[in-house]
Image (cartoon, rainbow, N blue to C red):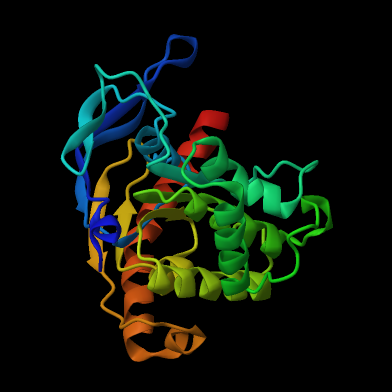
Amino acid sequence: MNGAAAAGALSIKYAGKIYDPDGLNVVALDDVSFDIRPAEFCVVVGPSGCGKTTLLNSIAGFDQLTFGEIYLDGALLASANKAPLPGADRMVVFQQGALFPWKTVLWNVTCGPIQQGKANRAAAERQARNLLSRVGLKGIENQYPGSLSGGMKRRVEIVRALMNEPKVLLLDEPFRALDALTKSVVQEFLLELYDEIPKTIFFITHDIEEAIFLGDRVVVMTTRPGRVLKTIEVGIDRPRDYRVLTSARFLQLEREVRESIHDEARKAFEAGERELA
Protein backbone atom coordinates (compact mmCIF):
# COMPACT_ATOMS: atom_id res chain seq x y z
CA MET A 1 0.00 0.00 0.00
CA ASN A 2 1.43 3.39 -0.92
CA GLY A 3 1.53 6.44 1.34
CA ALA A 4 -1.58 8.04 -0.17
CA ALA A 5 -3.61 4.89 0.42
CA ALA A 6 -2.36 4.65 4.02
CA ALA A 7 -3.60 8.15 4.94
CA GLY A 8 -7.02 8.65 6.46
CA ALA A 9 -6.81 7.74 10.15
CA LEU A 10 -9.83 9.13 12.00
CA SER A 11 -9.91 9.63 15.76
CA ILE A 12 -13.21 10.54 17.42
CA LYS A 13 -12.75 11.68 21.01
CA TYR A 14 -15.66 12.30 23.41
CA ALA A 15 -17.77 13.74 20.59
CA GLY A 16 -21.10 15.24 21.55
CA LYS A 17 -23.82 17.19 19.77
CA ILE A 18 -26.80 18.96 21.31
CA TYR A 19 -29.53 20.41 19.10
CA ASP A 20 -31.78 23.08 20.55
CA PRO A 21 -34.97 23.33 18.43
CA ASP A 22 -37.66 25.50 20.01
CA GLY A 23 -35.62 25.85 23.18
CA LEU A 24 -35.45 22.10 23.91
CA ASN A 25 -32.03 20.49 24.38
CA VAL A 26 -31.90 17.37 22.20
CA VAL A 27 -28.76 15.32 22.79
CA ALA A 28 -27.95 13.59 19.50
CA LEU A 29 -24.44 12.38 20.43
CA ASP A 30 -22.96 11.90 23.88
CA ASP A 31 -19.33 11.02 24.67
CA VAL A 32 -18.67 9.08 21.45
CA SER A 33 -15.09 7.83 21.15
CA PHE A 34 -13.48 5.39 18.73
CA ASP A 35 -10.67 5.30 16.19
CA ILE A 36 -10.80 4.27 12.54
CA ARG A 37 -7.61 2.86 11.07
CA PRO A 38 -6.22 4.07 7.73
CA ALA A 39 -7.97 2.25 4.85
CA GLU A 40 -10.40 0.58 7.27
CA PHE A 41 -14.00 -0.02 6.20
CA CYS A 42 -15.93 1.03 9.32
CA VAL A 43 -19.72 0.65 9.42
CA VAL A 44 -21.94 2.33 12.02
CA VAL A 45 -25.37 0.87 12.73
CA GLY A 46 -28.09 1.92 15.13
CA PRO A 47 -31.77 2.78 15.42
CA SER A 48 -33.23 5.92 13.88
CA GLY A 49 -32.22 9.01 15.81
CA CYS A 50 -29.06 7.47 17.29
CA GLY A 51 -26.82 10.18 15.82
CA LYS A 52 -25.23 8.24 12.95
CA THR A 53 -25.84 10.99 10.40
CA THR A 54 -24.90 13.70 12.89
CA LEU A 55 -21.54 12.01 13.40
CA LEU A 56 -21.00 11.65 9.64
CA ASN A 57 -21.93 15.31 9.10
CA SER A 58 -19.46 16.36 11.80
CA ILE A 59 -16.66 14.45 10.05
CA ALA A 60 -17.72 15.87 6.67
CA GLY A 61 -17.64 19.44 7.97
CA PHE A 62 -21.38 20.07 7.65
CA ASP A 63 -22.15 20.20 11.37
CA GLN A 64 -20.37 21.52 14.46
CA LEU A 65 -19.78 19.48 17.59
CA THR A 66 -21.00 20.79 20.93
CA PHE A 67 -18.08 19.14 22.71
CA GLY A 68 -15.27 16.71 21.94
CA GLU A 69 -12.95 16.57 18.92
CA ILE A 70 -12.43 14.67 15.69
CA TYR A 71 -8.95 14.31 14.19
CA LEU A 72 -7.88 13.28 10.69
CA ASP A 73 -4.29 12.02 10.47
CA GLY A 74 -3.54 13.77 13.74
CA ALA A 75 -4.85 17.19 12.64
CA LEU A 76 -7.90 18.70 14.33
CA LEU A 77 -10.88 18.33 12.01
CA ALA A 78 -13.86 19.22 14.20
CA SER A 79 -14.52 20.60 17.68
CA ALA A 80 -16.83 22.92 19.58
CA ASN A 81 -14.44 25.79 18.85
CA LYS A 82 -13.78 25.02 15.19
CA ALA A 83 -16.23 26.18 12.53
CA PRO A 84 -17.40 23.34 10.23
CA LEU A 85 -15.36 23.19 7.05
CA PRO A 86 -15.96 20.64 4.25
CA GLY A 87 -12.94 19.58 2.25
CA ALA A 88 -11.93 17.45 -0.73
CA ASP A 89 -10.11 15.12 1.67
CA ARG A 90 -13.57 13.92 2.78
CA MET A 91 -16.13 13.07 0.10
CA VAL A 92 -19.76 12.21 0.85
CA VAL A 93 -22.16 9.94 -1.04
CA PHE A 94 -25.72 10.74 0.08
CA GLN A 95 -28.73 8.43 0.08
CA GLN A 96 -30.79 10.97 -1.91
CA GLY A 97 -28.20 11.35 -4.66
CA ALA A 98 -26.56 14.57 -5.83
CA LEU A 99 -25.71 14.23 -9.52
CA PHE A 100 -26.28 17.22 -11.80
CA PRO A 101 -29.16 15.99 -14.01
CA TRP A 102 -28.45 18.43 -16.85
CA LYS A 103 -24.84 17.24 -17.21
CA THR A 104 -23.48 13.99 -18.64
CA VAL A 105 -22.07 11.20 -16.51
CA LEU A 106 -18.56 12.04 -17.70
CA TRP A 107 -18.95 15.71 -16.74
CA ASN A 108 -20.35 14.75 -13.33
CA VAL A 109 -17.42 12.53 -12.43
CA THR A 110 -14.64 14.75 -13.84
CA CYS A 111 -15.79 18.22 -12.77
CA GLY A 112 -14.22 17.99 -9.30
CA PRO A 113 -10.59 17.20 -10.18
CA ILE A 114 -10.69 19.50 -13.24
CA GLN A 115 -12.06 22.50 -11.31
CA GLN A 116 -9.64 21.91 -8.42
CA GLY A 117 -6.71 21.73 -10.82
CA LYS A 118 -5.81 18.19 -9.77
CA ALA A 119 -5.90 16.92 -13.36
CA ASN A 120 -6.32 18.25 -16.87
CA ARG A 121 -9.41 17.25 -18.82
CA ALA A 122 -7.74 14.47 -20.81
CA ALA A 123 -6.24 12.83 -17.71
CA ALA A 124 -9.47 13.18 -15.72
CA GLU A 125 -11.57 11.67 -18.50
CA ARG A 126 -9.14 8.79 -18.89
CA GLN A 127 -9.31 8.02 -15.17
CA ALA A 128 -13.10 8.39 -15.14
CA ARG A 129 -13.56 5.93 -18.00
CA ASN A 130 -11.31 3.46 -16.21
CA LEU A 131 -13.22 3.71 -12.91
CA LEU A 132 -16.63 3.56 -14.60
CA SER A 133 -15.51 0.42 -16.41
CA ARG A 134 -14.42 -1.15 -13.11
CA VAL A 135 -17.94 -0.79 -11.71
CA GLY A 136 -19.66 -2.18 -14.80
CA LEU A 137 -20.58 1.17 -16.38
CA LYS A 138 -18.43 1.19 -19.49
CA GLY A 139 -20.05 3.10 -22.36
CA ILE A 140 -22.45 5.30 -20.36
CA GLU A 141 -20.16 8.34 -20.22
CA ASN A 142 -22.33 10.49 -22.50
CA GLN A 143 -25.66 9.57 -20.91
CA TYR A 144 -27.51 11.82 -18.48
CA PRO A 145 -28.41 10.80 -14.89
CA GLY A 146 -32.13 10.73 -15.70
CA SER A 147 -31.59 7.76 -18.02
CA LEU A 148 -29.81 5.68 -15.34
CA SER A 149 -31.25 3.20 -12.85
CA GLY A 150 -30.88 3.80 -9.11
CA GLY A 151 -28.04 1.30 -8.85
CA MET A 152 -26.18 2.90 -11.74
CA LYS A 153 -26.53 6.35 -10.18
CA ARG A 154 -25.07 5.11 -6.87
CA ARG A 155 -22.06 3.66 -8.70
CA VAL A 156 -21.55 6.90 -10.62
CA GLU A 157 -21.62 8.87 -7.35
CA ILE A 158 -19.05 6.57 -5.76
CA VAL A 159 -16.80 6.97 -8.81
CA ARG A 160 -17.26 10.75 -8.63
CA ALA A 161 -16.20 10.73 -4.98
CA LEU A 162 -13.13 8.59 -5.70
CA MET A 163 -12.10 10.85 -8.58
CA ASN A 164 -11.31 13.54 -5.99
CA GLU A 165 -8.83 11.16 -4.28
CA PRO A 166 -10.17 11.76 -0.76
CA LYS A 167 -8.54 10.42 2.39
CA VAL A 168 -11.97 9.44 3.71
CA LEU A 169 -15.10 8.31 1.88
CA LEU A 170 -18.31 9.00 3.82
CA LEU A 171 -21.38 7.02 2.75
CA ASP A 172 -24.77 7.97 4.21
CA GLU A 173 -26.98 4.91 3.60
CA PRO A 174 -26.29 5.16 -0.15
CA PHE A 175 -28.10 1.92 -1.05
CA ARG A 176 -31.18 2.35 1.15
CA ALA A 177 -33.62 3.01 -1.71
CA LEU A 178 -32.42 0.11 -3.88
CA ASP A 179 -34.23 -3.20 -4.20
CA ALA A 180 -32.54 -6.23 -2.63
CA LEU A 181 -31.04 -7.67 -5.83
CA THR A 182 -29.70 -4.32 -7.06
CA LYS A 183 -28.30 -3.57 -3.60
CA SER A 184 -26.44 -6.89 -3.58
CA VAL A 185 -24.81 -6.19 -6.94
CA VAL A 186 -23.84 -2.61 -6.06
CA GLN A 187 -22.38 -3.75 -2.73
CA GLU A 188 -20.13 -6.21 -4.57
CA PHE A 189 -18.96 -3.50 -6.97
CA LEU A 190 -18.15 -1.27 -3.96
CA LEU A 191 -16.11 -4.05 -2.37
CA GLU A 192 -14.22 -4.66 -5.61
CA LEU A 193 -13.34 -0.96 -5.79
CA TYR A 194 -12.34 -0.96 -2.14
CA ASP A 195 -10.02 -3.92 -2.69
CA GLU A 196 -8.37 -2.17 -5.66
CA ILE A 197 -8.32 1.38 -4.25
CA PRO A 198 -8.14 1.14 -0.44
CA LYS A 199 -9.70 4.14 1.28
CA THR A 200 -10.84 4.85 4.79
CA ILE A 201 -14.60 4.36 4.58
CA PHE A 202 -17.14 5.56 7.13
CA PHE A 203 -20.45 3.93 6.18
CA ILE A 204 -23.75 4.27 8.03
CA THR A 205 -26.73 1.96 7.62
CA HIS A 206 -29.77 0.42 9.30
CA ASP A 207 -29.11 -2.87 7.48
CA ILE A 208 -27.32 -5.39 9.71
CA GLU A 209 -26.52 -7.80 6.86
CA GLU A 210 -25.07 -4.94 4.81
CA ALA A 211 -22.95 -3.77 7.74
CA ILE A 212 -21.31 -7.17 8.24
CA PHE A 213 -20.92 -7.92 4.53
CA LEU A 214 -19.10 -4.64 3.84
CA GLY A 215 -17.27 -3.78 7.02
CA ASP A 216 -13.99 -4.61 8.70
CA ARG A 217 -15.62 -3.42 11.91
CA VAL A 218 -19.19 -2.67 12.99
CA VAL A 219 -19.85 0.06 15.57
CA VAL A 220 -23.26 -0.37 17.22
CA MET A 221 -24.86 2.83 18.55
CA THR A 222 -27.45 3.23 21.31
CA THR A 223 -30.71 5.06 20.83
CA ARG A 224 -30.70 8.79 21.60
CA PRO A 225 -28.53 10.06 23.11
CA GLY A 226 -26.20 8.25 20.72
CA ARG A 227 -23.33 6.44 22.41
CA VAL A 228 -21.14 3.54 21.34
CA LEU A 229 -22.80 0.39 22.64
CA LYS A 230 -20.44 -2.17 21.14
CA THR A 231 -17.65 -2.50 18.60
CA ILE A 232 -17.44 -5.78 16.68
CA GLU A 233 -14.49 -6.93 14.56
CA VAL A 234 -15.90 -8.73 11.51
CA GLY A 235 -12.85 -10.88 10.77
CA ILE A 236 -14.07 -12.22 7.40
CA ASP A 237 -11.33 -12.48 4.79
CA ARG A 238 -11.33 -10.29 1.70
CA PRO A 239 -12.13 -10.35 -1.15
CA ARG A 240 -15.76 -11.14 -0.31
CA ASP A 241 -18.78 -12.04 -2.39
CA TYR A 242 -22.36 -13.10 -1.71
CA ARG A 243 -21.27 -16.60 -0.64
CA VAL A 244 -20.07 -15.31 2.74
CA LEU A 245 -23.69 -14.50 3.62
CA THR A 246 -24.33 -18.15 4.49
CA SER A 247 -21.04 -18.85 6.27
CA ALA A 248 -21.05 -19.81 9.94
CA ARG A 249 -18.99 -16.75 10.87
CA PHE A 250 -21.36 -14.38 9.07
CA LEU A 251 -24.46 -15.87 10.73
CA GLN A 252 -22.76 -15.69 14.13
CA LEU A 253 -21.94 -12.01 13.61
CA GLU A 254 -25.43 -11.23 12.35
CA ARG A 255 -26.93 -12.77 15.49
CA GLU A 256 -24.51 -10.83 17.71
CA VAL A 257 -25.26 -7.48 16.07
CA ARG A 258 -29.00 -8.13 16.00
CA GLU A 259 -29.07 -9.02 19.69
CA SER A 260 -27.03 -5.91 20.52
CA ILE A 261 -29.27 -3.57 18.57
CA HIS A 262 -32.69 -5.10 19.29
CA ASP A 263 -33.20 -3.51 22.72
CA GLU A 264 -31.98 -0.15 21.41
CA ALA A 265 -34.43 -0.28 18.50
CA ARG A 266 -37.24 -1.08 20.94
CA LYS A 267 -36.27 1.88 23.14
CA ALA A 268 -36.27 4.16 20.10
CA PHE A 269 -39.71 2.89 19.06
CA GLU A 270 -41.17 3.35 22.54
CA ALA A 271 -39.65 6.84 22.82
CA GLY A 272 -41.29 7.76 19.53
CA GLU A 273 -44.65 6.59 20.83
CA ARG A 274 -44.21 8.64 24.00
CA GLU A 275 -43.36 11.75 21.99
CA LEU A 276 -46.55 11.29 19.97
CA ALA A 277 -48.70 10.67 23.05
Q: Quadrant of the N terminus?
A: bottom left
Q: Is residue 37 left or right of residue 65?
A: left
| Total number of numbered discs in the rendering | 0
Residue 53 point in image, percent of width and height: 44, 40
Residue 225 point in image, percent of width and height: 33, 35
Observer able to see residue 277: no
Q: Quadrant of residue 231?
A: bottom left
Q: Quadrant of the C terminus?
A: top right
Which residue is found at the position 36% from the left and 33% from the top?
Answer: 58
> Which residue in the rendered view is the most extreme toward the top?
23
Q: Is residue 220 left or right of residue 174?
A: left
> Which residue in the rendered view is the most extreme toward the right?
147
Q: Is residue 195 left or right of residue 37?
A: right
Q: Quadrant of residue 135?
A: bottom right
Q: Nearer the viewer, residue 232 or 101?
A: 101
Q: Nearer the viewer, residue 127 or 195?
A: 127
Residue 121 point in image, percent of width and height: 61, 48
Observer able to see residue 271: yes
Residue 97 point in image, percent of width and height: 65, 46
